[in-house]
């Protein structure tokens, strides 16, 4: 018998994004809720069967979600704010979607819950909201229904839930602040989880998995007590039903739990899931120090749920062998949910077999899991005879890709000066203001404009060679003409070309870089029904040709206003690609920085005066443990950004953009990127970052997003004026820009133009107020 195998979670969007398509169809009125439910059921059945056929022992259920698992957990616990209940929809799915994406229609007008990045991934979760009136209770049968559904299919699954600790640590009050965790709330939440465990015991589940990724973060005062309070109330429920015991797997991932391992171990969980990829050394050291409780099975997370390269079996076996010297109870597991990798390599016909053999997506990882578990129990002789092991070893013999000597040479000649822009910011600022002549509170957008069906279809046709290049180019030019004219018309100050030629802000760049590979269908869920398709870093990277110059230059030639050039920064390109595992992220980022630096200088030479270098994903990969922030990340990520723009003229204004506003704690590092202007997401949530900016004497000008682009609702001018007032209470008007939260490509024109018109009107209104005020104070 080989070791128990366990999958923490499986992608739910479907092999061909079936779930996305049916749900978006429902939103557009093209499919019914019954269609949505039927597709969902079909996908669950298919995914369970795939795992069963692969021979996985513990197959997850309740890892399915229409939108997000945190949102599901909020609904499960009845944390549904009053404003969503009031919409009084007939179907619970509609309430769920309103919480996820906002709602504007006959039932009312509400914004969505805030959305944040899920730990260090590009997946976004919805932030549950809890206030004094929230009545925590078991409010849904979803986990039980899905368990029964699989059971009817002949598969006894392991239900998966977000654990209570993670839920409470990530939930917020209506002011977006951390919760005051009083006894009543903690008891109520643990009570519901105990009820769930009992119910699963009754239903005949053997295991329940509680995901507690928040345990891999640094502990604050009271955290360990909170964990203890929750689980001492929950664990007795395992055996509360006579004759029916259910085991509880405490699952952790994305890092190590060394600082609470001793406590966890004393609790005697039936299973403890440890990430042996991202938290390897610390987790192993903790086991070394405290041992493993007698009845606890360690679920060794050795199959990477975050990257798509083949598992190195020899390395995994080394880890498992080491663990087995500490405990006899070892199960083999994915290191995290497979939600964060694409579905399957099948169908990636664009990649040659000798390339494709280096990759494992979710479906292939199932086989790896089972292979590794079998090998883990084999003795040396059997391992020597194993063809699977020999084939796997051959993938790692160092012959995969040859190094690019020119790239290495260029990096070797860089000096400190290449990382510092001259002159200092205050001096540049004056020169830029003279050069650009913009009004106070200048208005702009983040770059992309709606990608209509027509645009997407033209791009697809051009890609497939169905239309001539000239036809496609003329089409893009006409789109640019239109978007420039419309931006002029509504009175925006700094214009953009609209990014119509780009399928994706990372893939588009990758396509013009040496060293990159692309997939056809390797989609990964990003938020709700949105998916991304990261390109793959295969070898050393360099710029193959100018990337954006042509269309930026064209757009600038169509207007007297300043047109902002749009680039993606090196840290983001890497963070939203599948990085190599054979060289460091630092080195890969430097290679990318040189490529984008070439592009910046070409744009400048082509007459572009404002260049935005998006670092939408910089915060995303900030290590979860504070002690790792600088040495494992910021110390090379921030200089890489500076390398990109350090050679521009003083009058060239460098912007950057980030898709979040949680950078209070790294404010100095953000300022050290030495951009002239930074825009960031700020409409879903508070503006505390502006206080931090103020306190830190932040020098970069700021554009806190004034409205949410992840939602189809149109903000009114009045609402936007109020938002700008709120911003100006915290920031100096001379340093503030007015822009939406993020790019507009996912939105429709019908909501985009009214929203932007209101935004410009709001900026003008406040400008006039400011002018009056200063007049009044002079008089
Ligand atoms: N310039 C990009 C756009 O507007 C930025 C997108 C992003 O930040 N994710 O689409
Ligand atoms: Zn953004």
Image (tube, grey):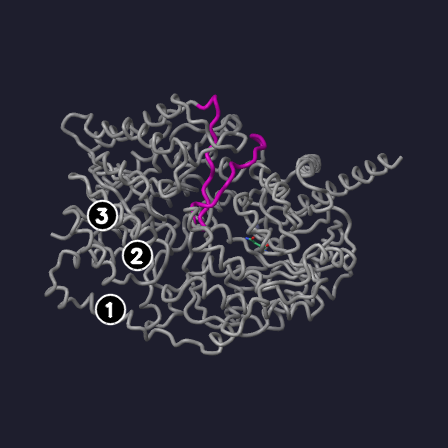
Residue 677, compared with residue 359, is above or below; it is above
Pointer 2 residue: 363
Q: Quadrant of residue 708?
A: top right
Of badges 2 and 3, nearer the viewer stands 3
Residue 286 in the image: x percent, y percent?
26, 46
Question: In this rendering, does residue 43 appear at all?
Answer: no
| Identity of the residue furthest to the bottom in this view | 405
Q: Secondary structure at mark 2?
A: helix
Front residue of 48/205: it is 205
Number of residues whose C-alpha sits closer than 10 Å to that of mark 1, classed few (under 14), some (14–19) or many (20 or more): some
Marks 2 and 3, Cα distance to the nearest angstrom? Answer: 33 Å
Residue 218, compared with residue 434, is above or below; it is above
Q: Earlier in the sequence, mark 1 or mark 2?
A: 2
Pointer 3 residue: 288
Residue 164 in the image: x percent, y percent?
35, 33
Provide the residue span drawn in magenta: 106-134
Marks 1 and 2, Cα distance to the nearest angstrom? Answer: 20 Å
| Marks 1 and 3 close (CB-CB < 8 Å) | no
Pointer 1 residue: 393
Say if the magenta span includes residue 116.
yes
Of badges 1 and 2, nearer the viewer stands 1
Q: Earlier in the sequence, mark 2 or mark 3?
A: 3
Q: Secondary structure at mark 3?
A: helix
Front residue of 362/539: it is 539
Say whether residue 122 is left or right of residue 387.
right
């Amino acid at each position: 018998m080989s070791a128990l195998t366990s999958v923490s979670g499986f992608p739910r969007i479907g092999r061909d994004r079936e779930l996305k398509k049916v749900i978006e169809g429902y939103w557009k009125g093209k499919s019914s809720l019954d269609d949505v439910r039927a597709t969902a059921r079909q996908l669950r059945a298919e995914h369970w069967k795939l795992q069963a056929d692969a021979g996985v022992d513990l197959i997850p259920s309740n890892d399915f979600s229409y939108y997000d698992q945190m949102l599901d957990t909020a609904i499960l616990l009845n944390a549904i704010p009053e404003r969503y209940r009031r919409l009084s929809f007939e179907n619970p799915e509609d309430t769920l979607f309103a919480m996820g994406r906002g709602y504007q229609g006959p039932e009312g007008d509400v914004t969505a819950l805030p959305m944040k990045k899920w730990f260090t991934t590009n997946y976004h979760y919805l932030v549950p909201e809890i206030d004094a009136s929230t009545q925590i209770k078991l409010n849904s049968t979803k986990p039980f229904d899905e368990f029964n559904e699989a059971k009817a299919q002949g598969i006894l699954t392991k239900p998966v839930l977000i654990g209570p600790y993670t839920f409470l640590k990530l939930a917020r009050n209506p002011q977006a602040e951390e919760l005051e965790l009083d006894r009543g709330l903690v008891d109520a939440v643990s009570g519901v989880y105990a009820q769930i465990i009992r119910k699963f015991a009754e239903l005949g589940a053997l295991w329940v998995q509680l995901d507690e990724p928040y345990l891999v973060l640094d502990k604050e005062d009271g955290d360990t007590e909170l964990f203890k309070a929750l689980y001492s109330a929950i664990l007795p429920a395992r055996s509360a039903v006579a004759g029916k015991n259910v085991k509880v797997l405490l699952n952790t991932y994305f890092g190590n739990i060394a600082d609470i391992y001793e406590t966890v171990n004393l609790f005697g969980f039936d299973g403890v899931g440890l990430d042996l990829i991202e938290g390897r050394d610390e987790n192993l050291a903790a086991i070394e120090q405290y041992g493993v409780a007698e009845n606890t099975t360690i679920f060794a997370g050795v199959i990477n749920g975050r990257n798509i390269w083949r598992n190195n079996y020899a390395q995994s076996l080394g880890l498992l062998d080491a663990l087995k010297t500490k405990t006899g109870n070892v199960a083999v597991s994915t290191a995290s949910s497979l939600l964060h990798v694409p579905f399957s390599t099948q169908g990636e016909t664009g990649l040659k077999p000798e390339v494709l053999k280096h990759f494992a997506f979710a479906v292939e990882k199932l086989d790896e899991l089972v292979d590794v578990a079998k090998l883990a129990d084999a003795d040396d002789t059997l391992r020597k005879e194993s063809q699977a092991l020999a084939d796997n070893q051959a993938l790692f013999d160092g012959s995969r890709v040859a190094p690019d000597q020119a790239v290495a040479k260029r990096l070797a000649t860089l000096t400190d000066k290449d990382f510092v822009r001259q002159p200092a910011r205050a001096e540049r600022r004056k020169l830029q203001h003279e050069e650009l002549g913009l009004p106070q509170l200048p208005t702009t957008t983040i770059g992309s404009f709606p990608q209509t069906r027509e645009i997407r279809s033209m791009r697809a046709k051009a890609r497939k060679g169905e239309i001539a290049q000239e036809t496609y180019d003329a089409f893009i030019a006409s789109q640019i003409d239109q978007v420039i004219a419309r931006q002029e018309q509504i009175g925006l100050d700094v214009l953009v070309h609209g990014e119509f030629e780009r399928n994706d802000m990372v893939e588009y760049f990758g396509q013009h870089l040496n060293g990159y590979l692309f997939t056809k269908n390797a989609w990964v869920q990003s938020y709700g029904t949105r998916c991304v398709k990261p390109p793959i870093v295969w070898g050393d990277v360099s710029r193959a040709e100018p990337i954006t110059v042509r269309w930026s230059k064209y757009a600038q030639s169509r207007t007297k206003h300043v047109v902002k050039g749009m680039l993606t920064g090196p840290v983001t390109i890497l963070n939203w690609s599948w990085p190599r595992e054979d060289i460091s992220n630092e080195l890969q980022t430097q290679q990318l920085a040189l490529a984008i630096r070439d592009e910046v200088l070409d744009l400048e030479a082509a007459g572009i005066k404002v260049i935005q270098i998006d670092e939408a994903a910089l915060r995303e990969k900030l290590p979860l443990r504070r002690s790792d922030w600088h040495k494992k990340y910021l110390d090379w990520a921030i200089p890489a950004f500076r390398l990109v723009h350090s050679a521009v003229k003083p009058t060239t204004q460098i912007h950057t953009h980030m898709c979040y506003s949680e950078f209070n704690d790294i404010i100095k590092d953000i300022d050290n990127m030495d951009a002239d202007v930074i825009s960031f997401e700020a409409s879903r949530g508070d503006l505390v970052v502006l206080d931090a900016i103020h306190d830190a004497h932040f020098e970069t000008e700021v554009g806190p997003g004034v409205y949410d682009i992840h939602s189809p609702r149109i903000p009114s001018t009045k609402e936007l004026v109020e938002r700008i007032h709120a911003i100006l209470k915290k920031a100096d008007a001379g340093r503030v820009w007015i822009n939406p939260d993020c790019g507009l490509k996912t939105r429709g024109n019908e909501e985009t133009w009214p929203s932007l018109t209101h935004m410009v009107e709001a900026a003008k209104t406040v400008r006039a107020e400011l002018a009056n005020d200063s007049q009044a104070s002079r008089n």
